[in-house]
Image: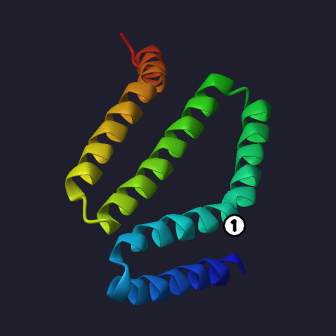
Amino acid sequence: MEVIKIIGIAFIALIIVVLLKQYRPEYTIYVSIVAGILIIALVIDKLAGVITLLQNIANKTNINSQFLGLLLKITGIAFLSEFAVSICQDAGENAIASKIEIGSKILIVSMSIPIISSLLEIIIKILPN
């Protein structure tokens, strides 16, 4: 099971971080980054399967492929920004972490405007005059 591997990587990284903090605390951030990359590498094939499934559903239901692409990009921004925020918080840089959160939220809102406007157009068409 992949969750066991993920937890194993996390616990090994945690033990290394705890041990490293005593002698070389400046290297603990690198351990955190490597652990995160390893975990992402473990689940990337599952993500590819989800993307393929969503594309198949979109093709069958005639959903605009641009919207699917936007949703995938928005999801990617959310995951990557959460990863970056966690790394910054691990390094004790909460101010930078909050700036990443704000920036990524603004990007997500700006990217979702076409989807929101399309939904509003559909709602307007459905509502009686």
Nearest the eye: 129 or 95: 95
Image vertical order of residue 21 relative to residue 118, above or below: below
Q: In percent of the image, x 56 and y 30: which residue is there?
A: 70
Nearest the eye: 7 or 37: 37
Image vertical order of residue 71 relative to residue 27, above or below: above
| Mark 1 crowd level (few <14, some 14–19, many ≥20, 10 Å Cα) | some
Q: From the viewer's perspective, is 126 left or right of 93? A: right
Give the farthest residue toward the left: 95
Image vertical order of residue 31 relative to residue 63, above or below: below
User: Quick one: quadrant of the C terminus?
Assistant: top left
Nearest the eye: 14 or 69: 14
Image vertical order of residue 50 relative to residue 39, above or below: above
Residue 5 at x, y = what percent?
66, 80
Quadrant of res 93? bottom left
Q: In percent of the image, x 65 and y 84: which residue is there?
A: 4
Asked if one can make out residue 64 in the rendered structure from this viewpoint, the answer is no
Residue 10 at x, y = what percent?
53, 80
Disc 1: which residue: 42
Does dot 1 land on a helix, a strand or a loop?
helix
